Amino acid sequence: MKIIVCGFGYVGATVAACLLREGHSIVGVDISPDKAAAISAGRSPIHEPGVNGFLRAGHADGRLLGSTEVGDHVLDADMALICVGTPSKPNGSLDLSYVVKIARQMGEAVRRRDPARSPLLLVFRSTMLPGSMDKVVLPNLLETAGEAPGGRYEVAYNPEFLREGTAIADYFAPPKTVIGERAPGTSKKLLGICDGLDAPIFEVPFAVAEMVKYADNSFHALKVAYANEVGRLALSLDIPPQRVMEIFLADTKLNISPYYLRPGTPFGGSCLPKDVRALAACMREQGVSAPVMENILASNASHKQFLVQEIGRRLPVGGR
Ligand SMILES: NC(=O)c1ccc[n+]([C@@H]2O[C@H](COP(=O)([O-])OP(=O)(O)OC[C@H]3O[C@@H](n4cnc5c(N)ncnc54)[C@H](O)[C@@H]3O)[C@@H](O)[C@H]2O)c1
């Protein structure tokens, strides 16, 4: 396939390198003239093991072009992967301005595409909060393209699960592939680039795909923070932290498993509240800062309150 990769930062460069390796042709587009020049010369603009070699080999075969704009490539490309940044604003909220800009550019560009061709599949890979595709990306595309998806263009959301440092290995052996689509089957073309990847594929509405990415990343962050709190407490008590966590991790029945990870009831019973309270108190006594442990009971209390409110809300008026 001929694939445009818009945004040649960390994600764009890695994905482009892997797609070149798979035999596709890539047009790498970045608004940074330095990055566009690097792509045109077959050089990686980012540092990630393996990426430079794949880009160089693809460039030597004539399958890698670089540019600062999409230009006429929109006329005959099969797909465009949108990998622009979604940084934090000063107040912590998500800055979608790059996504909006590229969505509008692509919307304008597809107007020139021959309607007899199959739609250009615009695959958004940037991390975006739930609702962004439906409330921000699609309206901007609709307005600028002057038509709904399904004709000259189609839209998909495909979050990225690469880790820096092992990105190439992660690309070829992902934990999963999640495809957010407008309606079932509208992003079949995307499955073409997932061929040969040994991973379960989930085809879901946009908002589910968007939310999965945040559920994953926040859980990964929570795991790190949790392990470090356990580690700090262990150190303060002269207990080897790595040994504690080795034994913790060896339990794949209750610890590293689907248990306790389904949304539903709060925890209760005779042990969990008492032990979490005791552990938080112990950490305070030891002078170990532990915001995660300290807030577990508060989070559980919020959930109980939520359930009571939900039950009240769902009762028929005047019902019991
Ligand atoms: N870095 C990671 O490990 C990682 C992993 C998973 C997901 N993500 C997500 O993927 C997205 C991209 O991340 P990144 O780290 O590659 O970002 P980045 O900032 O490294 O790269 C983004 C690139 O997009 C370019 N760009 C911006 N607007 C453009 C436009 N209109 N046309 C063409 N190019 C444009 C910028 O010049 C920049 O080179 C973000 O949403 C991020 O949250 C990142």
Image (cartoon, grey):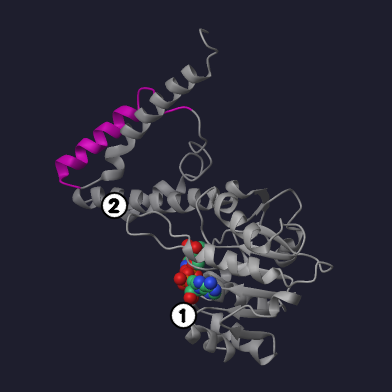
- 282 is within the stretch colored magenta: yes
- Foreground: 275 or 224? 224
Residue range highlighted in magenta: 265-288
268 relative to 82, above or below: above
Tally of marks: 2
Q: Is residue 308 left or right of residue 105?
A: left
- Foreground: 285 or 297? 297
Say which residue label 1 marks.
47
Q: Is mark 1 within 8 Å of ligand 1?
A: no
Label 1–label 2 contact, CB within 8 A: no
Say if residue 208 shows up in the picture: yes
308 relative to 277, above or below: above
- Foreground: 266 or 116? 116
Q: Residues within 10 Å of mark 1 (few under 14, many from 20)?
A: few
Quadrant position of the N terminus in the picture: bottom right
| Residue that extends furthest to the right in the rendered view of this protein | 116
Helix, strand or loop for disc 1: loop
- 284 is within the stretch colored magenta: yes
Q: Residues within 10 Å of mark 2 (few under 14, many from 20)?
A: some
Say if residue 176 shows up in the picture: no
Residue 19 percent coordinates (x, y): 66, 75
Q: Is residue 26 left or right of residue 10?
A: right
Q: Quadrant location of residue 276?
A: top left
Q: Quadrant location of residue 274?
A: top left
Q: Nearer the viewer, mark 1 or mark 2?
A: 1
- Earlier sequence position, callout 1 versus callout 2: 1
Residue at the spot 60% in from the left edge and 85% down from the top edge:
66
How far apart are the alpha carbons under marks 1 and 2? Answer: 31 Å
Q: Amino acid at mark 1?
A: His
Q: Amino acid at mark 2?
A: Gly
Say which residue label 2 marks.
231
